[in-house]
Image (tube, rainbow, N blue to C red):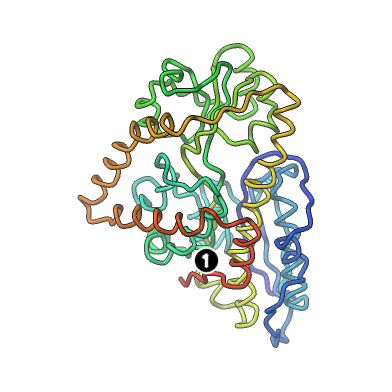
Amino acid sequence: MLRTLKIVAATSTLLVVNLAQADRGEDWLAGKSSGKPAITYSGAPIELKYGHPSPPASVLVPVAQANIKRIAAATNGKLLIKEYGSGSLFGAKDGFKGVRTGVGEWGICYPTYEGRGMALSRVWEQPFITPSNPMAATRVAQELASKYFVPEFKKQGVSWGNYVAFKPSDVLSKKPIRKIEDLQGMKIGAQGFSPEIAKALGVALVNLPYPELYTALQQGIIDAVFWVDAGFIPFKLHEVAKYHTALALTGGGAWTCYNTEAVAKLPPDIHQVFMRGLEPFAMQSVKVSGVDFAAKAVDAYKAANVEMITLAPAELKRFKDKLQPLVDAWADDLEKDKIPARALLKDIQTLSAKYQSMTPDELMKLSIENPVIVNP
């Protein structure tokens, strides 16, 4: 009889086309990398339920499915994972509760829905904090997890899994944005965007479901959208908004957490496969959604006659100077409660400088050969 653990995992809900491309990450998913642990566990296969909120068309679903096959092969069939998509086990807002109570042992856990209790984990929502290289952001988060994020996850009764960083948000608009004043008075569609940032930029936020953004742009309900390429293109927003301004404004992503006790009970060799795979699985997910898709989006923008705007360095500095007081206020507020926000910001800056210029292949190699194992 199979021992059964119910496991839920997270991926983003970005809808995109299939991007199959041979690379180091795909080789890892195919089991071609070295350093595989010897599997000595001889008991019955352990079956894990893997659920996520992504629809079948998500670019991250093929990555997750390939990882399921990799785990089965790496454990000689002793760890079998069955995928459950579209949030069928528990919803994104219930991740921490679901994992903590054992509804699932691994799942999407959004700090955004946990209020002030996870302030440091929400650092990526601050303007111009997330490195523009999203794979670098994933590595930075992994290295800083034990010091800053694990304690917040432990307070929720779970363990840190990994962080799939999204590419920081840009703006797609119906009129060109070349300076900060061009944003004034705009109605901008966005979800999970800070109202403080919107106020500082002089824009009005309009919270709309993603499928409604196209019509809202078309009808003039909104003038622009803060999002990423892997959202703009699949929802065809570039058909009605013809100006893309690179800002790399705010970050975000998908976190996973796991049930500490359940994963600790895995046989040591199986446990090693699970733990060592967390970072490279996240890294390949980021590469596919935030790097590969962004590169392919260039052709889609060109075909749709979208003007690609890169702000002058002096103008980008104006944006950063305008929003830096918000970051300072966020940090000062946390420091009053003895929460080390400023130390976190400094560490992110230091590590971002270290990893920002590394190539996707270099970062993928690092995560495979030297993954940061984050202990509970």
Q: Nearer the viewer, residue 294 or 67?
A: 294
Residue at horizontal 49 percent and vertical 69 percent from the top: 374
Q: Position of residue 221 (x, y in %)?
A: 55, 14
Looking at the image, residue 234 lies above or below residue 146: above
Q: Which residue position is annotated with label 1?
A: 259
Residue at horizontal 42 percent and vertical 46 percent from the top: 129
Q: At label 1, which amino acid type do we have?
A: Asn
Q: Splitting the image into 4 quarters, where does residue 310 fall?
A: top right
Residue at horizontal 72 percent and vertical 50 percent from the top: 61
Q: Is residue 91 left or right of residue 351?
A: right
Q: Is residue 156 visible?
A: no
Q: Position of residue 372 (x, y in %)?
A: 52, 69
Residue at horizontal 53 percent and vertical 56 percent from the top: 138
Disc 1 crowd, CA 10 A, few/some/many (<14, 14-19, 20+): many
Q: Is residue 258 left or right of residue 351?
A: right
Q: Is residue 321 visible?
A: yes
Q: Nearer the viewer, residue 79 or 313?
A: 313
Looking at the image, residue 138 lies above or below residue 228: below
- Element assignment for label 1: loop
Q: Position of residue 114 (x, y in %)?
A: 41, 48
